[in-house]
Amino acid sequence: MIRLDATAPDFAAAFTALVNARREADEDVARDVTAIIARVRNQGDVALAELTAKFDGHDLDAGGWRVEPGVCKAAFDTLDPELRSALELAATRIRAYHAAQRPADSDTTDDAGIRLGARWRAVDAAGVYVPGGRAAYPSSVLMNAIPAKVAGVERLVMVTPTPKGETNALVLAAAHLAGVDEVWRVGGAQAIAALAYGTDKIAPVDVVTGPGNAWVAEAKRQLYGVVGIDMVAGPSEIVVVADGTNDPRWIAADLLSQAEHDPTSQSILFTDDAAFADAVAREVDAQIATLATGATARTSWDANGAIILVPTLADAMPLVDRLAPEHLELACDDPETLFAQVRHAGSVFLGRHTPEAVGDYVAGPNHVLPTGRRARFASGLSVLDYMKRTSFLALDAAGLGAIGPAAVALAEAEGLPAHARSVAIRLGQ
């Protein structure tokens, strides 16, 4: 774990190194993913079956390619009532939050009598990737599938690996609750390729969303353009800005909520209180020892964690913007003042009683967020990721007369006479 002091002479260089540090897996996966994509494109279901047997130890032909809707419903119906209620609460809140994101069509007529506007429509089909390796997350099913259905996607496909043929009942229950139409027992880069190109069994989709490992992320990157994607996501990260009046146990737990995800996750604390920084560091060590995920959290914290002492919390905000974190907690008396200074963050959690973890499950905003400083130019998953906008324009003779001559002049200036003629001929020129 790194300890930095913003007043130290070498702080600028040390913080720059922290900002620029790579946390992605070291494996050079691009070449392997390219080969996998080519196999699926050329061999379709044959390649899917072979790769699933190789990587997941599951025989698709013997054990089944799909999980039927009745199985997903049964998984939901047989859930422990308390857990089912929790899933339903999460789904209700996620659906309500994303329903408010639906954009409105526009249709106006300007002063020149020209009608112009835009119409929003959902994509025809979307694919959701749900991990099944290190852990399986029903919350990710809800966060990816519900916005697609709110957008109006008619065919929603879920792909998820089933190692050794084992399915996760919670994931299947969440798929039923979210309205997933198809569930396929394939994962990895090969699943992304199948969604993009289609196979005899799996029809292609228009957009692919959802988290995954380095191979999945690389497949999405390579296939963007063949299919739409939400983002290329990297390791999880959290930045907490906290004053010394917080309970160090709370802040340590918040830092570990991301550290337990993966050895490459990152947790960073900014504080203006040196004694509090020491207390949080001690508490992190104490809590790691109690976690079932302690080995992962230990590796993450030791390799990528940081505690940074700043003169005031306001001094932390420009540094936070340079990190452009996936998750940002502002645990202080006046979080709104600090929030007003935030330019780059995936999602912000305001106040001492708003842990990031509540946002992962039941609050409503999406937990699929840009990582690796991509919050500088990207946003979290939303209804808009499953929709596209079509503009439209309607002119009558008077409207064309009002703006057509300018179009002719510009077309001629660009050396495009056919463009100019298509307008000028209507103007009688």
Image: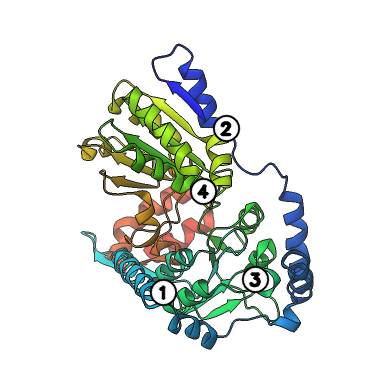
From the top left corner, tell me how far across and down residue 415 is, in percent. 54, 47
Q: Earlier along the polypeptide chain: callout 1 or callout 2? A: 2
Give the residue at mark 2.
21
Q: How far separated are the C-alphas under marks 1 and 3? A: 24 Å
- The answer to which of 129 and 377 lies nearer the viewer is 129
Q: Is residue 158 above or below residue 244?
A: below
Local crowd size for mark 2, using a 10 Å CA cut-off: few (<14), some (14–19), many (≥20) = few
Query: Residue flagged by tag 1: what amino acid is it?
Result: Lys
Q: How far separated are the C-alphas under marks 4 and 3? A: 22 Å
Give the residue at mark 1.
149
Q: Secondary structure at mark 3?
A: loop
Q: Are marks 2 and 3 in contact (CB under 8 Å)?
A: no
Query: Residue flagged by tag 3: what amino acid is it?
Result: Thr
Q: How far separated are the C-alphas under marks 2 and 4? A: 19 Å
Query: Residue flagged by tag 2: what amino acid is it?
Result: Ala
Observer-side mark, 4 or 1, equals 4
Q: How far separated are the C-alphas under marks 2 and 3? A: 33 Å
From the top left corner, tell me how far across and down residue 77 is, in percent. 43, 84
Q: Secondary structure at mark 2?
A: loop
User: Is any atom of residue 374 visible in this view?
Assistant: no
Give the residue at mark 3.
162
Observer-side mark, 1 or 2, equals 2
273 on left or right of 327: left
Local crowd size for mark 1, using a 10 Å CA cut-off: few (<14), some (14–19), many (≥20) = many
Observer-side mark, 2 or 3, equals 3
Name the residue at the bottom extreme. Answer: 70
Q: Earlier along the polypeptide chain: callout 4 or callout 3? A: 3
Question: Residue 59, located in which quarter of the rendered image?
Answer: bottom right
Query: Residue flagged by tag 4: what amino acid is it?
Result: Glu
Observer-side mark, 2 or 4, equals 4
Give the residue at mark 4.
260
